[in-house]
Image (cartoon, rainbow, N blue to C red):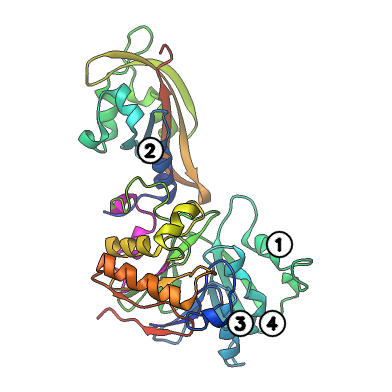
């Protein structure tokens, strides 16, 4: 397997050391990595799931808005950052593998490197009520 | 391909009785192809000796800079062909988000840091910014990629007639990796070095020294050899020796690392003046 772009490698290394939950996707929106603090909220372990296609991670957590309406994958901040290449922020609910519903607040931004190379997007998120 | 090491020292030129065998000049390597093209990798102080060795009739030079730290550009104005009218010189180097390569080089090549300004150079200079896909330079195919080191820094993979040489003189792939080496997918520089016939790689520190210099952008010899093993290279040249390391100490570091790692590849000590013939065998 060939290596990730250097900026993505650095982003993952940073994520591995932060206590803030972080999720990284590639230019197609496929999940490349999430860190240990994210595992606590998502209810999944990266070592168990490994990378996930966009269609899988964007639905597996059953994201819903404050009124309980399902959020379409393209309306999730991380997909907005990936597809439209601009930062996005939203507060919504997800259901982890442990079937617990959690309210999260998430900010995503595109990873645009020198030479206008689009490398994917990175999201930080947290539970606002905890 | 024929490689010649004109400068193998890292960070600062370090001439003296303790550095006679490995040399005191900073990074400069030439790669000569089968059709006679010569690529110059970096313009540390070693490039001065290279310039002196070239015939006055030379009319073309190709210089590939990995980065703009002083130990990689300090010799540039002392490279003879640059001072000759009619010589066409192509210089490649890393792009930045703000200033052009030319503007950044001018910070050094202008008073008060240097008495001669870049615009007073007599040769016909062209500046090219990388990474920008794959470069074709006569018989060579050159791939440039950013690698982990402070400020934009490139590594090069040079291919000719099925042979591959990889040059990554400043590189800290172990930076913050919880375990090293990680998988190939998450290792800086892997694509550049994968399966190379020869890898020239940063080996500035001892393992002990690395722990107090973490984040400076360099590797220990042990880390460099682990990287070489991960990449599956055939031959490995430790390079960019620390300025405080004597010849005897570098000998001992190589001996110790080889005994500990038992590499399946050949280790060729990176000594100034050494030449290596590379073919895919």
Kind of element beneath mark 3? helix
Q: Which residues are magenta?
A: B184-202
Tell which subunit mark 4 falls on.
B
Label 2 and label 4: CA atoms lie apart by: 50 Å
In three-dimensional space, the C-alpha distance between marks 4 and 3, rounded to whole angstroms, equals: 12 Å
Query: Which of the two discs, 1 and 4, sits closer to the camera?
Result: 1
Q: Are marks 1 and 3 on the same chain?
A: yes
Q: Residue at x 34, y 81 (%)?
A: B278
Cβ atoms at labels 1 and 2 below 8 Å apart: no
Label 1: few (<14), some or many (≥20) within 10 Å? some
Q: Is residue A52 left or right of residue B246?
A: left
Q: Which residue is mark 2?
A: A16
* Residue under pointer 3: B48
Q: Which label sits in the foreground, 1 or 3?
A: 3
Q: Which residue is mark 1?
A: B107
CA gap, disc 1 and disc 2: 37 Å
Q: Which mark is residue B83?
A: 4
Q: Where residue A36 sits: x, y (%)? A: 33, 31
């Amino acid at each position: 397997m060939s290596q990730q772009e250097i900026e993505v490698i650095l982003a993952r290394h940073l994520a591995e050391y932060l206590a803030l939950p972080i999720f990284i996707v590639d230019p197609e929106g496929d999940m490349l990595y999430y860190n240990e603090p994210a595992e606590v909220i998502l209810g999944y372990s990266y070592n168990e799931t490994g990378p996930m296609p966009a269609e899988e991670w964007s639905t597996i957590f059953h994201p819903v808005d404050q009124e309980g309406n399902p959020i379409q994958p393209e309306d999730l901040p991380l997909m907005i950052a990936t597809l439209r290449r601009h930062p996005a922020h939203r507060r919504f609910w997800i259901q982890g593998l442990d079937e617990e519903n959690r309210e999260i607040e998430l900010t995503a931004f595109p990873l645009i490197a020198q030479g206008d190379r689009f490398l994917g997007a990175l999201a930080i998120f947290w539970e606002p009520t905890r | 391909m024929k490689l010649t090491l004109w400068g193998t020292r890292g960070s600062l030129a370090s001439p003296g009785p303790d550095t006679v065998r490995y040399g005191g000049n900073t990074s400069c390597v030439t790669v000569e192809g089968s059709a006679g093209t010569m690529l110059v990798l970096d313009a540390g102080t070693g490039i001065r000796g290279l310039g002196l060795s070239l015939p006055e009739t030379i009319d073309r030079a190709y210089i590939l800079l990995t980065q703009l730290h002083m130990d990689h550009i300090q010799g540039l104005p002392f490279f003879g062909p640059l001072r000759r009218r009619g010589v066409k010189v192509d210089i490649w180097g890393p792009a930045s988000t703000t200033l052009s390569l030319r503007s950044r080089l001018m910070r050094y090549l202008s008073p008060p840091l240097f008495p001669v300004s870049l615009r007073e150079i007599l040769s016909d200079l062209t500046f090219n910014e990388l990474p920008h896909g794959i470069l074709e330079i006569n018989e060579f195919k050159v791939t440039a990629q950013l690698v982990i080191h402070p400020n934009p820094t490139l590594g090069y993979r040079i291919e000719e007639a099925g042979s591959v040489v990889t040059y990554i003189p400043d590189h800290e792939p172990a930076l913050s990796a919880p375990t090293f080496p990680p998988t190939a997918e998450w290792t800086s520089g892997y694509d550049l070095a994968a399966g190379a016939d020869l890898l020239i790689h940063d080996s500035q520190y001892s393992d002990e020294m690395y722990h107090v210099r973490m984040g400076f952008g360099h590797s220990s010899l042990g880390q460099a050899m682990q990287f070489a093993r991960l990449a599956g290279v055939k031959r490995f040249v430790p390079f960019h020796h620390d300025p405080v390391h004597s010849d005897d100490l570098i000998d001992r570091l190589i001996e110790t690392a080889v005994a500990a790692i038992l590499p399946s590849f050949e280790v060729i000590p990176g000594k100034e003046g050494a030449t290596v013939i590379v073919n895919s065998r």
